[in-house]
Image: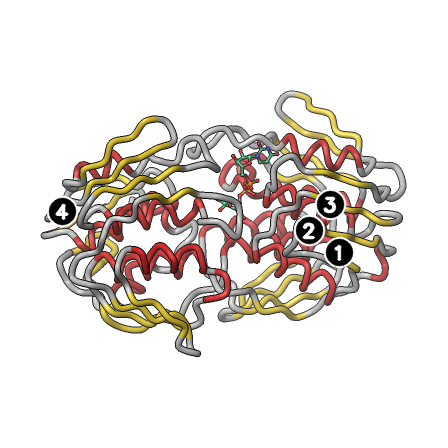
Amino acid sequence: MQKLKITGGRRLCGELEIQGAKNSALPLMSACVLVGGSCRLKRVPALADVHAAARIINRLGCKCRREGKDILIDSSVLTGVDIPDDLMRSMRSSVIFLGALLGRTGECRLSYPGGCELGPRPIDLHLSALRKLGAVITEEHGTLRCTCTGRLRGTRIELSFPSVGATENIMLAACTAEGETVISGAAREPEIEDLARFLNACGARISGAGGHRIVINGVERARLHGTEHEVMPDRIAAATYLCAAAATGGETLIKGAPAEHSGALTDVLRQAGCRVFESGRGLYLTAPARLRAVPMIRTCPYPGFPTDAQAVVMAALTRARGTGMVVERIFENRFRHVDELIRMGADIKTEGRVAVVTGVDRLSGAAVVAPDLRGGAALCVAACAAEGETEVTGLNLIDRGYEAIEKALTELGGKAERVSG
Ligand code: UD1
């Protein structure tokens, strides 16, 4: 079992090139299976979740291999429609292959993605939308069997909540449906726009992605083809490193960080006393020696404050002057980092989905356990600002979303190393 040793108390000052976005790379890899040709995805981060997606693609009989920062996927031949249970369990977002396989072959079998560390994560919105498109879905012994005879049929789908995964699954399935599909109440996350750009370059006809209403005009499967596409930069990894710099009173340039997709985060960092601006090369931040508390942060669907950045911002604010409140409105169980931050000396009280953070003068290094991907990243942020050494176990969870986090923190002037045992 690998862990991370971080020696805190250094100002993080330096530059870092941001990785490609995990939450874009995964749906794009699934889309490669839909289009049935040769695709090159550029700037794909080397992450455990990307590796799991590559294994799924290979198990479906397609070819997927890495070439430097790129991933090449050839899905001209597809021999299976089953997503194995072990891979379904290792990455909940493998459910994104459902829409792609239905659109490609009219068939898919996968195990039911159970609850996860963030609380129950149902897929009812995905399934009801796919049923509306004409898929027949049955569940037996924990396996979902999805079929349709002939092509799916375009329809109107109104999402009661702008689910990112459901919006992506519908887009993938509807690309080859007969006629027009209209999604209203769609998620507006930039990763959805990235997926639409890729699919359109492959011959699909999607408009409105990035807005509440997405229109997909179905095309014959044979009209789809491969393409080359660069994965968009990771706004959440960028948020994490900006927060690490902010927590240490540092100064940093996150090269390639997408300012246009980071507005809610940069507003909060400015309220905390940082100077943040777009430099033309990325996002530049200078932080005061001690941050100011931010009275209220509420996570919301995009363009609101992202739930994925909640934990890292909270970690940065544990040493702020004053008291602030964080309300988590997207996931039920997304405060699991709080107990670990308290071990490091933070003063945080939670009640349901609300956390009250009172800044303390100092954090101290401790042995802590990453509770989940972003919670683990939050512990790294706090560790950079803490006195002494912090040992973070559960590095496998952090590796799901951060490409060599220890190297990134070191590049920024921190002291972090990966150790075994
Ligand atoms: C995606 C992101 C994840 C991010 C989340 C919210 C990927 C790979 N993951 O996850 O990092 O935290 O968006 O921005 O892109 N829900 C239902 N029924 C459904 C689907 C969702 O009730 O059928 C609920 C979920 O339980 C959750 C909320 O909707 O409470 C948001 O989920 P969703 O937007 O679907 O997130 P994911 O696509 O799973």
Mark 3 Cβ inside 8 Å of ligand 1: no
Q: In this rendering, does residue 128 appear at all?
A: yes
Mark 4 Cβ inside 8 Å of ligand 1: no
Residue 334 percent across, percent down from the top left: 39, 36
Pick whichever of labels 2 and 1 is earlier in the sequence.
2
Question: What residue is drawn where x is 49% and y is 43%?
Answer: 300
Residue that numbered label 1 is attached to: 77
Residue that numbered label 3 is attached to: 183
Q: Quadrant of residue 372?
A: top left
Residue that numbered label 4 is attached to: 363
Q: Is residue 250 left or right of residue 267?
A: left
Pick whichever of labels 1 and 3 is earlier in the sequence.
1
Between label 2 and label 3, give the one nearer the viewer: 3
Q: Amino acid at mark 1?
A: Val
Mark 1–mark 3 Cα distance, whole angstroms, equals 30 Å
Q: Quadrant of residue 6?
A: bottom left
Question: What residue is drawn where x is 30% and y is 64%?
Answer: 407
**From what the image shows, is residue 296 above or below residue 77?**
above
Q: Which mark identifies residue 61?
A: 2
Q: Amino acid at mark 4?
A: Leu
Question: What residue is drawn where x is 37% and y is 71%?
Answer: 277
Q: Estimate how packed mark 3 is, as few (under 14), some (14 to 19) or many (20 or more) residues with alpha carbons within 10 Å.
A: many
